[in-house]
Amino acid sequence: MAKSKKSGAGFLVQGSILAMASIISRVIGLVYRIPMTDIIGDLGNSYYGSAYEVYSIMLIISSYSLPLAVSKLVSAQVVKGRKKMAYQIFRGAMLFAIISGTLFSLLVFFGAEFFSDIYLKTPNCIFALRVLAPGLLVVAVLGVLRGFFQGLGTMMPSAISQIIEQIVNAIVSIWAAYCLFGYGQRIGAVLGDPEHYAAAYGAAGGTLGTNLGSVAALLFALFIFCIFIKGYKRQMRKDRSRNVEPMSATMRILIITIIPVLLSTTIYNISGFIDNGIYKHISYAQGYSSDEIDVWWGVFTGKYKLLINVPISIASAMAASSVPALTAAFGRKDMADVRMKIKAATRFVMMIAFPSAVGLAVLAKPIFLLLFPSTSATVDIAAKMMMFGSIAVVFTALSTLSNGLLQGINRLKVPVINALIALVAHAILLVVLMLFFRMNIYAVVIANAFFALMMCVLNQIGLARYSGYHQEWIKTFFIPALCSGIMGIVAFLVYQGLYALSSSNAGAVVVAILVAFVAYAIFMLLFKGLTEQELKHFPKGDLLIRLFKKMHLL
């Protein structure tokens, strides 16, 4: 039992490391998108977002499943003491990454015209798409390195490389967007369309940051790997397990593991790619102008999705850290430890997701005015999207986590089937909302939330069936939701009061967020949503316990 508790603490700490890195990365991503949006505008955000949808789905197909698959397979070998076989899996995965990354880079580069003109009906995103193409190879190789370290039980290389990636991405994106926006204006002046060419070239500059950020992260990961591998090879020489499988057998194991994860992540994430096509084709058929359609999509991808992805990234981090730990516990047939890890990860994610969703809904317009003052003309559209769709934070966070949990207990097909069911239902709902209710971009927001909700329900049924885990509702869902609701009322009243007194939106928003954070923590402790034992598993948990005891909250 003591071992199980220690395992649980380490599991949460590793997840917290990756979660904190993801939060920092998302915050950096949010911060740099503010000046970038000032430069390229909502129109440029549409071109950037459209190109990124294609890049993302190609990334998922080519290599997104690699870190998860590699960490799962490496963890399974390391727990048996088979260091040589773990390294063989790494070598096979690297070969797979180089081949798939190269093929998909070429596909995106030479197929950019088809994606931009025919499928997305956004010809001006072609420049951004071609700039992004080489990044597919870089990210594939980087994913294998991250997966190898995660399989060994350390999240630090992945965490630091994520932060480096975003810092370089931020600096280069702003600089390149500014330079290329001006270049596009000059070209557009000659061709008689400075607005669209400037936005298109500016978006391409933004995507250049994505590529160079990935290169910087890869160089860091390779540096750490070169230092680490010397000691690891000494451990391999002490490995007395039977000979490693031949490379052909290793590649077969990799492919068998990758395909279900690939199908799951592709189906789960392809919704944005499908949404883009459905939304734009139906909107054109309904008579909206290309600028209206592009601006709405730019607000959706460059403002709404940008904000909700910050808390959702925590779930992605927890899912990534869950897989090796769950695989090891499942391999030991320690189902009590498996259920404990599922419970701990779910509670951790829900404690973040609920207040994030409520806070974004209550302070939607003030936050958008604070972050994007230069595009205030579309702030009402963005705020309305957030009020419609902030609940997607909870659903998406839980469904993302449960995907990883199911994969960790070797139920790789379950998320695939669930995602396919949810995807079809979501596409039907999107078409109905657009055709019969003419909800245009708001239909995309609602359909996205519905997709995540269906995934939550179906995945939770799968977890209960295959792990024996029965969801605890009061402390995991009801108390965080109740405390978040009270927090939302406090945040709203504080903002309105301060704004009435000072007329300063920035000051009122910042203070309201800080007060909301403190209020949520206090109500969680008062309602026993968080215990001293659970706080010990948090980063700086002992410090938090001492602080809360001084405040007589524990």
Image (tube, rainbow, N blue to C red):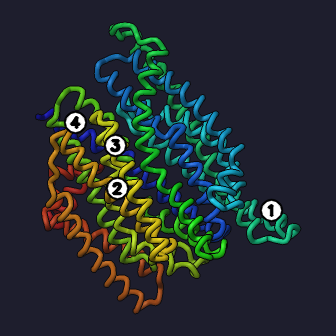
- The reply to whether residue 384 is visible in this rendering is yes
Of circles 1 and 2, the one toward us is 2
Q: Please rate how many residues cluster around mark 4, counting C-alpha atoms within 10 Å: few if below 14, some from 14 to 19, many from 20.
A: some
Question: Quarter holding the N terminus?
Answer: top left
Q: Position of residue 217 (x, y in %)?
A: 56, 41
Indicate which disc, 3 or 1, sits on the residue closer to the N terminus.
1
- Classify mark 3: helix, strand or loop: helix
Above or below: residue 57 compared with residue 493: above
48 or 461, which is in the foreground?
461
Q: Which residue is mark 1?
A: 183
Q: Which residue is mark 3?
A: 404
Q: Please rate how many residues cluster around mark 1, counting C-alpha atoms within 10 Å: few if below 14, some from 14 to 19, many from 20.
A: some
In this view, the residue farthest toward the right is 190
- Classify mark 2: helix, strand or loop: helix
- Classify mark 1: helix, strand or loop: helix
Q: Amino acid at mark 1?
A: Tyr
Question: Quarter holding the C terminus?
Answer: bottom left
Q: Please rate how many residues cluster around mark 2, counting C-alpha atoms within 10 Å: few if below 14, some from 14 to 19, many from 20.
A: many
- Along the horizontal axis of the image, is 459 left or right of 254? left
- Disc 3 to disc 1, how far (Cα)? 44 Å
Indicate which disc, 4 or 3, sits on the residue closer to the N terminus.
4
Q: Amino acid at mark 3?
A: Gly
Q: Which residue is mark 4?
A: 7
Q: Position of residue 474 (x, y in %)?
A: 14, 61
